[in-house]
Image (tube, rainbow, N blue to C red):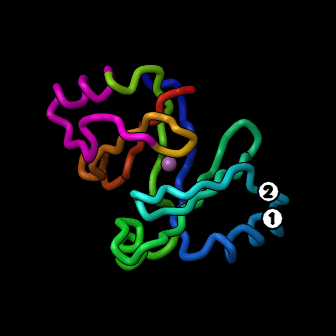
């Protein structure tokens, strides 16, 4: 069951160029850096009160994120919803015929189980599900 918004994901070309901007604008500091080798992504979480913004930078030319930046430019990439049971939610979405990028959860940042819906399923918005720790 969906419990709330976990984070907003923002695609950028360079974390090194982006992070000082959010610090200068709002005094927001990164809390957690991580590289997802398989996805070709380096990411950082910036806490905003009780919520988080995730900034994503591609590390490989063939990464899906590189293609996203070429097509759409920098900006909001996905919205992540928090769930208490990702397997049950994926099953129920599949039963409704929803187009899923991941039929089974994969391991995302901080070792959490995550899965993406196809943007076609939600009016052009890429939705990530992440299981609560
Ligand atoms: Co995310």
User: What residue is disc 1 on?
Assistant: 23
**Picture coordinates of residue 31, whole percent (x, y):** 74, 50
* Chain part drawn in magenta: 88-107
Mark 2 touches mark 1? (CB < 8 Å): yes
19 magenta-colored: no
**Picture coordinates of residue 97, whole percent (x, y):** 14, 34
Task: Judge: label 2 CB < 8 Å from ligand 1.
Answer: no
**Picture coordinates of residue 95, whole percent (x, y):** 16, 25
Q: Is residue 103 left or right of residue 32?
A: left
> Of helix, strand and loop, which one carries label 1?
helix
**Picture coordinates of residue 64, whole percent (x, y):** 35, 65
User: What residue is disc 2 on?
Assistant: 29
Image height of 44 relative to 99, above or below: below
Which of marks 1 and 2 precedes in the sequence?
1
Number of numbered discs visible in the structure rendering = 2
> Of helix, strand and loop, which one carries label 2?
loop
Image height of 65 relative to 50, above or below: below
| Label 1: few (<14), some (14–19) or many (≥20) C-alpha neighbours in 10 Å | few
95 magenta-colored: yes
Residue located farthest toward the front when viewing the structure as drawn:
37
Q: Residue at x 85, y 59 (%)?
A: 27
Q: Quadrant of the C terminus?
A: top right
Q: Is residue 25 left or right of residue 11?
A: right
Q: Residue at x 47, y 44 (%)?
A: 108
Q: Residue at x 33, y 24 (%)?
A: 87
In this orientation, which residue lies closer to the viewer: 33 or 95?
Answer: 33
Q: Residue at x 19, y 31 (%)?
A: 94
Give the spatial CA distance, label 2 vs label 1: 6 Å
In this orientation, which residue lies closer to the viewer: 41 or 12?
Answer: 41
């Amino acid at each position: 069951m969906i419990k709330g918004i976990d984070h907003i994901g923002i695609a950028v070309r360079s974390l090194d160029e982006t992070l000082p901007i959010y610090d200068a604008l709002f005094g927001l500091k990164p809390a957690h850096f991580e590289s997802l080798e398989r996805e070709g992504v380096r990411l950082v979480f910036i806490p905003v009160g009780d919520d988080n913004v995730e900034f994503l930078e591609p590390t490989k030319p063939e990464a899906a994120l590189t293609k996203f930046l070429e097509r759409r430019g920098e900006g909001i990439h996905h919205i992540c919803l928090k769930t208490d049971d990702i397997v049950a939610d994926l099953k129920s979405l599949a039963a409704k015929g929803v187009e899923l990028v991941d039929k089974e959860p994969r391991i995302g940042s901080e070792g959490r189980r995550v899965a993406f819906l196809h943007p076609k399923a939600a009016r052009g918005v890429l939705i990530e599900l992440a299981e609560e720790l």
